[in-house]
Image: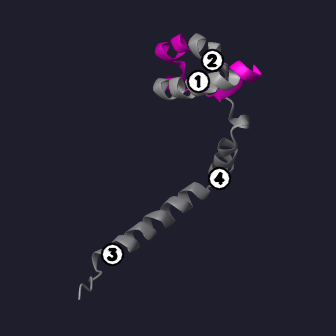
Amino acid sequence: MIEAFDLFTSRYANEYAIHKKPCIIILDNASMHTSDAFLAQQDNWAARGVLFHYLPPYSPELNLIEILWRKVNMNGCLCRVTSVMKILKKSVVHILSNLEMNTA
């Protein structure tokens, strides 16, 4: 992650030198974004015009997949989907394992 941001910020630094418009990157609080090594680099990246804004630690209302997951889970669809997926997987495996390849 650090290497990727180093590469990005080194490229962005040229644009920042001309326009003085910072690039704001929104991050969640994943361990890779909050590690000591990552945080230690943020001043260097800020000097290149790249700043970070962290989402609140738990903010499902800002993440659309969390809203969808809650609705699916509340309606009990998850159990039905899981059952259907197991049946589908079993059927596909059965078909593929019994498939004869025509190599002629």
Left or right, 37 with respect to 12, comes to left
Nearer the camera: disc 4 or disc 2: 2
| Residue at the disc numbered 3 | 96
Residue 7 placed where, x, y %? Answer: 52, 27
Which image quarter: residue 96? bottom left
Residue 2 shown left or right of residue 24 in the figure? left
Q: Position of residue 26 (x, y in %)?
A: 67, 28
If you read the primary sequence from the N terminus, does the residue marked by circle 3 or circle 1 appear first? 1
Q: Indicate which disc residue 9 carries.
A: 1
User: Of circles 3 and 1, which is in front?
Assistant: 1
**Dot 1 amino acid type:** Thr
Q: Secondary structure at mark 2?
A: loop
The crowd level at tag 2 (other Cα within 10 Å; few <14, some 14-19, many 20+) is many
Q: Mark 3 or mark 4, which has the lower sequence index?
A: 4
Is there CB contact under 8 Å for labels 3 and 4?
no
Q: Between label 4 and label 1, give the one nearer the viewer.
A: 1
Residues at discs 4 and 2 in contact (Cβ within 8 Å) = no
The residue stretch that appears in magenta: 17-41
- Whether 47 is among the magenta residues is no
Query: Residue 20 colored magenta?
Result: yes
Amino acid type for the residue under numbered disc 2: Arg
Residue at point 48%, 12% (across, down)? 36
Alpha carbons under labels 2 and 1: distance apart: 6 Å
